[in-house]
Amino acid sequence: MNIKDYIKEKIRNILDINIDDIVIEIPKDKTHGDYSSNIALKSSKILKKSPMDIAITIKNNLDNDEKFDSIEIASPGFINFYVKKQYLFDNINKILEEEDNYGKSKSSKNIKINLEYISANPTGILHLGHARGASYGDSLARILTFAGYDVTREYYINDAGNQMNNLGISIKERYKEICNVDFKLSEDCYHGKEIKDIAQKIYDEYNNSKLDEPIEYFKKYGLNILLNNIKKDLKDFRIEFDVWTSEQSLYDNNKVQEVLEKLKKDNQTYEQDGALWLKTSDYKDEKDRVLIKADGNYTYLLPDIAYHNYKYERCYDIIVDILGADHHGYIPRLKAAMEMIGNDSSKLEVKILQMVRLIQNGKEVKMSKRTGNAITIRELMDEVGVDATRYFYIMRSLDTQMDFDMDLAMKKSNENPVYYIQYAHARICSILRDANKQNLQCSNTFETINSEEAFDILKKLYDFNNTIENSASKRLPHLIANYAYDLAGLFHTYYAKEKILTDNKKYSEERIALIKAVKITLKNALSLIGVSAPEKM
């Protein structure tokens, strides 16, 4: 149990009240202790006692606790905890023993989570907006898994509906153009370079022998290529999925029709102006929504309902969707639909990712120099690198708009946060290599470490478990990115003030153990957000 949870449990037992939101913080001002709590102020009304009296009660009960050097009270009722240094030293040995598993939950939480992200239409190439959802989703999946959740990573392939027909038409018309046959591209067609490339591939393989093939042929041919391109880009971006669910399979397996019939049977629909409407306004949506248009075509809401119902059928405890900024208004109607078909909508969490602006030379870059279209994830990987791209996307909260500074991301200096962190890891590796040449080992006892900078590191190392728990439970991967940056900063400060390798064997081996613990924790943190930890730079 980490120290924050330990303090919370002790406070609950002392006060004998069930308070879930006991806040234990690490004070910015070090004179206010290693940890601090305002629980005496928060519980004053419940207990009908003054905050100071409550704080004194907590202090008196914990004064002899072996984990604390001292506990102090500050008006009007803050409680400041000073942890025994040996407790922090013991954690070094724990880190060295657990290595890659440090911070990992030792038991399953028995909570099944379905995490769906990206799910871009297979009608083009993944762009910089998809890269943000990809970075967030994959990092969250890694963090949740590390924290003991049972996670399924899922990609929903929108391979049915009008957009796929338009894909087939677009490829065929480009193929006709290459064959010197009259062609026509409507506004609904796709005009990207990748469409021309697919048409050219068909021509190179079959010459003009496919001119009489139906649209379905070109649709399937294009889908196969584009989906494989998406999978290749994602794999190179260090992202893989457990499940790829096809929208077309929902039609083939009758799941769309089953949901439609249930909604009709339960009187959740009505006809108006030739269209079929869903009564979502009865479930807190701002208005009713169309399921089937007057021309008989389904809106995208109907297969989406069937798809989410299919997730519920697979018995997940939590279903997380990561959607683009233009889907904010979609949440109420989707939750309403889940209630209509008998599912618990509270199990469905929808995370909205905000827009990304790519900045280079102080100006926004809107178009790709290569294709004339949106900047692709492949271009970001090639020009900026996977590590910097993933870190820059993760270091900001998903619900904030962000500027992706390409110039900063490519800098090989401490101004670049990912370089700053990786350099800390590489520098420690270099010191450890030198220590190995001198036959120095990691000490498991600590008598000479006493600097303020060292204890700042020790407290930060100890807080890694708590950071993972918060990141997982609150779905905030940027907490891990920020943690890695802060830990790297503490190491750089420590290294600038204190020599590691000296002629004193005991002194050196204690510090070797300390910095190796930093190295392990940095590597684990970076791994959770899909960033590498190089040993040389």
Image (tube, rainbow, N blue to C red):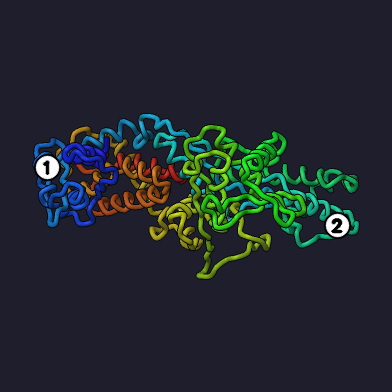
User: Viewed as shown, does residue 48 lie left or right of 386?
Assistant: left
Above or below, 446 relative to 336: above
> Which numbered disc covers residue 1?
none
> In the picture, residue 100 is in which quadrant?
top left
Q: CA distance from mark 1 to mark 2?
A: 80 Å
Which corner quadrant of the image does residue 306 belong to? top right
| Residue type, mark 1 in image | Asp
Residue type at mark 2 is Glu
Packing grade of label 2 (10 A; few <14, some 14-19, many >=20) is some
> Residue tagged by mark 1?
69
Relative image position of residue 22 (x, y in whole percent): 25, 46
Q: Nearer the viewer, residue 520 or 500?
A: 520
The residue drawn where x is 70% and y is 44% is 159
Q: Whole-percent x and y of residue 232?
A: 63, 43
- Which badge, 1 or 2, is on the more N-terminal residue? 1
Residue 177, numbered circle: 2
Q: Is residue 441 visible?
A: no
Q: Is residue 103 visible?
A: yes
Helix, strand or loop at label 1? It is strand
> How far from the left and from the top, in percent, is residue 417?
40, 56
Image quadrant assignment for residue 370: bottom right
Query: Taking 477 as reference, is 231 left or right?
Result: right
Q: Secondary structure at mark 2?
A: helix
Residue 304, position as x, y percentages in the image: 62, 45
Label 1 Cα crowd, 10 Å radius (few <14 / some 14-19 / many 20+):
some
**493 or 140: nearer the eye?**
140
Seen in the image, is 418 located left or right of residue 53? right
Q: Compared to 457, does 376 lie above or below? A: below
Residue at image position (39%, 46%) is: 474
